[in-house]
Structures are given as structure tokens and as C-alpha cells.
Image (cartoon, helix red, strand yellow):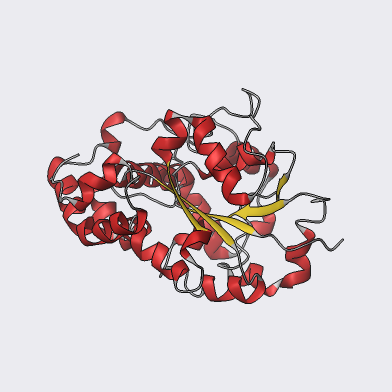
């Protein structure tokens, strides 16, 4: 069944509270967000090839919702995912865009943990953050915002800090609802308002289990994976998954300073873009803070 096109998009940043905001807005009687949360339609070539009819089908149950949207964090991962803004605005001419941001080092640390638990990251954190430019580029918030502002008016881009959402959820949610043109006096239930942490409680695969999975992919035998392997992978068995030690997530002070310096110019541009209500961490970044 074909539905309407969405009018708003939560574009990220990854590991900055997008799942929490998504769940909050799902409970709003005047809003509709699709399931799955992240269709990646405008960033994933395979999803894009499925066509607009498939994309519209994700919103077939939107009914008379006043605000219809989705939340794909890959929409703010330029240049790893390029052409997103162009594709999206060719389909939705005047989107409203919500960009939820987080203190940079905390975001990168959380992104590393997320990749570690999924098995896509195996390097120590210091090595990963210096060797993989995606960690820094995804945290280059001005760079990402500028891609959108090339096609979207400033008043259609809402910048929101995770700090705001955590410190005063109701006030932050009211800002979002005002931005979307829906009832800002509405409040979620306490259950719906609980913070979502997609990486909490998850364990990274052990080296031998990850190697077995990579071997399976290389040999093209994924259609012959035994049921017991599937169950083990989806479970939380200590046989195949290990705990994350606290010291694995420590970013050395020297690297913290290095990352702040690398982000300084971007943070300065973002501070100007954000204005007087910029969060404290951004003011520190744009003033050239050297430590976290």
C-alpha cells in the first residue's frame, strides 16, 4: 500500500540520542515515524533502487498525522555517504531537518563502542579514531549541516544538543514539536520517555567467532548457516561474545587534545551557525579547548 512522503527527517548525528527522540515522537498523536527507524533510502544505493513506491509504503499507516518523518543517521555522514541532500530534495522539496548533536569526544567514543559490539571494529580505540576518518567526519557537525543548508533554508534546520534533551526533556521536545507544527504541550509517558541506548548491554563477538563469520561471507555460504549458529549469534552467550573492559573506551588525553584541535575550525563555524543558545561544549570547542 502506497503512503505519503515524509516531511521531516532526523538526520543524526549517530550516537547522539536519535533513537530516544524517534521513540518520543512516535508516541505523539499528531506525528508518524516509520518502522524501521532508519530506512536509509537516500543514502543506501540498494534502498534507493527499490524506488519511491517502496519508500512511500513505509508511511502507509500515517493516516491523518500532521508530521510524518523518519530518522536515518547516514544522512549526516558526508562524504562517506554522498549525494544524500540532492536525492532527498529531489523527492521532498521543502523538508524539515532535525540535527541532534553531542559533545564530540563522547560521540566518537560511543560510535566506537557501537562498532565494536557489532563486530565491525577490532582496533584499539586510539588507533581507530586516528586511522578511520569517519569518526571525525561524522563529528564535523558544521560540515554536515552545510551540506543541508546548500538546499534547505536555515529556518528548516533545527540544531538540538543531546544535553538539552537529557537536562530538560519536556522543553527540548516542545522545541521539536513547535518546529514540526504539532502540539507542543503534549508529554510522553514515562515508559516512552526512557533514554534509549542501542549499544547498552551488547557484547562484541570474540575473535574466533568473528573470523568464522568472515569466512562464511568469503565462501558465500551464508544461505547454509546452521540454525544453532544463528541462535548463538543473536543471543548473548559468553562462548561467542565477551565483555567490554572499561579501559577499552578510554581516549588518551593527548588524543583528546588532538581531536579538539582537528575540530576547531568546524566548531567555530557551527558556533556561528547555532547562535547564542549553543551548548557549553560547543563554546569550549570553538574557543580552542585542548582537553575534555
State the count of labels. Answer: 0
Q: Residue at x 24, y 37 (%)?
A: 250
Compared to 185, does 134 lie above or below?
Answer: below
Compared to 57, does 108 lie above or below?
Answer: above
| Coordinates of residue 278 in the picture (x, y in percent) | 33, 46
Q: Is residue 248 visible to us here?
A: yes
The quadrant of the rendering that contains the N terminus is bottom right
| Coordinates of residue 82 in the picture (x, y in percent) | 47, 73
- Of 31 and 233, nearer the camera is 31
Q: Residue at x 66, y 32 (%)?
A: 186
| Coordinates of residue 218 in the picture (x, y in percent) | 52, 64
Residue sitting farthest toward the top: 190
Q: Residue at x 61, y 68 (%)?
A: 94
Compared to 99, does 152 lie above or below?
Answer: below
- Of 182 and 131, nearer the camera is 182
Q: Residue at x 54, y 58 (%)?
A: 97
The quadrant of the rendering that contains the C terminus is top left
| Coordinates of residue 90 in the picture (x, y in percent) | 62, 77
Compared across the picture, whether 185 is left or right of 133 comes to right
- Of 46 and 98, nearer the camera is 98
Compared across the picture, whether 249 is left or right of 83 comes to left
Answer with the quarter of the image where residue 190 lies: top right
Answer with the quarter of the image where residue 43 lies: bottom right
Answer with the quarter of the image where residue 163 lies: top left
- Of 42 and 189, nearer the camera is 189
Residue sitting farthest toward the right: 1
Q: Is residue 20 visible to us here?
A: no
Amino acid at each position: 500500500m502506497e503512503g505519503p512522503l515524509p516531511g521531516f527527517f532526523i538526520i543524526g548525528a549517530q550516537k547522539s540520542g536519535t533513537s530516544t527522540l524517534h521513540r518520543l515522537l512516535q508516541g505523539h498523536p499528531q506525528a508518524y515515524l516509520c518502522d524501521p527507524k532508519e530506512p536509509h533510502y537516500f543514502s543506501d544505493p540498494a534502498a534507493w533502487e527499490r524506488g519511491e513506491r517502496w519508500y512511500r509504503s513505509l508511511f502507509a499507516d500515517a493516516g491523518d498525522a500532521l508530521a510524518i518523518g523518519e530518522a536515518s543517521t547516514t544522512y549526516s555522514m558526508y562524504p562517506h555517504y554522498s549525494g544524500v541532500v540532492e536525492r532527498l530534495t529531489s523527492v521532498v522539496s521543502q523538508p524539515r531537518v532535525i540535527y541532534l548533536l553531542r559533545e564530540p569526544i563522547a560521540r566518537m567514543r560511543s560510535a566506537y563502542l557501537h562498532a565494536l559490539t557489532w563486530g565491525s571494529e577490532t582496533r584499539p580505540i586510539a588507533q581507530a579514531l586516528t586511522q578511520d576518518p569517519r569518526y571525525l567526519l561524522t563529528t564535523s557537525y558544521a560540515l554536515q549541516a552545510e551540506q543541508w543548508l546548500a538546499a534547505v533554508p536555515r529556518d528548516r534546520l533545527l540544531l538540538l544538543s543531546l544535553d538539552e534533551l537529557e537536562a530538560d526533556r519536556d522543553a527540548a521536545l516542545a522545541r521539536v514539536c513547535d518546529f514540526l507544527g504539532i502540539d507542543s504541550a503534549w508529554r510522553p509517558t514515562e515508559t516512552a520517555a526512557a533514554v534509549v541506548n542501542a549499544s547498552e548491554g551488547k557484547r562484541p563477538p570474540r575473535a574466533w567467532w568473528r573470523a568464522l563469520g568472515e569466512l562464511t561471507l568469503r565462501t558465500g555460504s551464508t544461505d547454509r548457516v546452521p540454525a544453532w549458529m544463528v541462535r548463538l549469534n543473536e543471543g548473548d552467550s559468553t562462548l561467542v561474545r565477551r565483555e567490554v573492559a572499561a579501559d577499552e573506551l578510554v581516549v588518551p588525553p593527548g588524543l583528546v587534545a588532538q581531536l579538539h584541535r582537528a575540530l576547531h575550525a568546524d566548531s567555530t563555524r557551527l558556533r556561528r551557525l547555532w547562535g547564542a543558545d549553543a551548548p557549553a561544549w560547543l563554546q569550549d570547542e570553538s574557543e580552542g579547548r585542548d582537553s575534555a
